[in-house]
Amino acid sequence: MTIKQLSIFIENRSGALLQILEMLRDNDINIVVSTLGDTDGFGIYRVICSDTEKAFKILREKNISATISNVYAVRLPHNKPGAAADVVAKVTKAGVGIKYMYSFMFGGNGIVVFRADNNDKAEEVMMLGKLDYLTEKDLNN
């Protein structure tokens, strides 16, 4: 029900992101979706990729700080205004906090990805709220 996501800590310096992208490319790791947020000294590059464990191992071997976390990816109904709000409402009304969220297009549908503060409750919402969640297999086909 969850998808593994890498969070990679990158210095805010020219070439740092390119180094990571080249490492992934050179090891045949496909990026499905990514987002980069920054602060004054570093950025957090969040990545959902074709082989999270392999990518994590490669980064750690190069002394690049990275973590793996579980996130949820929910397919939104096609061309429905407020669809993301509906997903967030179901999740938060069940008492689940969303730590962060981002979105992307996949297979003609909008997808929202979020990290929950309580995975047990979030999984209940996925099942009981009848949310159309994606798995890693869905994203890697």
Image (spheres, rainbow, N blue to C red):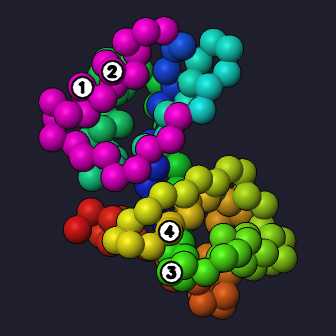
Where's residue 17, x and y in %?
40, 22
Which residue is label 1 attached to?
22
Q: Is residue 64 above or below residue 54?
A: above
Q: Earlier in the sequence, mark 1 or mark 4?
A: 1
Where's residue 137, x and y in %?
30, 69
Determine the residue positioned at 15% across, 30% down.
26
Instruction: Give SS at disc 3.
Output: loop
Q: Nearer the viewer, mark 2 or mark 4?
A: 4
Which residue is label 3 attached to?
78
Determine the residue positioned at 30% across, 34% down.
57
Which residue is label 2 attached to?
18
Confirm whether residue 51 shows in the render: no
Confirm whether residue 43 shows in the render: yes
What's the distance in space between the residues labelled 3 and 4, CA to CA?
Answer: 7 Å
Where's residue 107, x and y in %?
34, 71
Q: Is residue 140 above or below residue 29?
A: below
Front position in the image: 21 or 71: 21
The reply to whether dot 3 and dot 2 touch (C-beta < 8 Å) is no
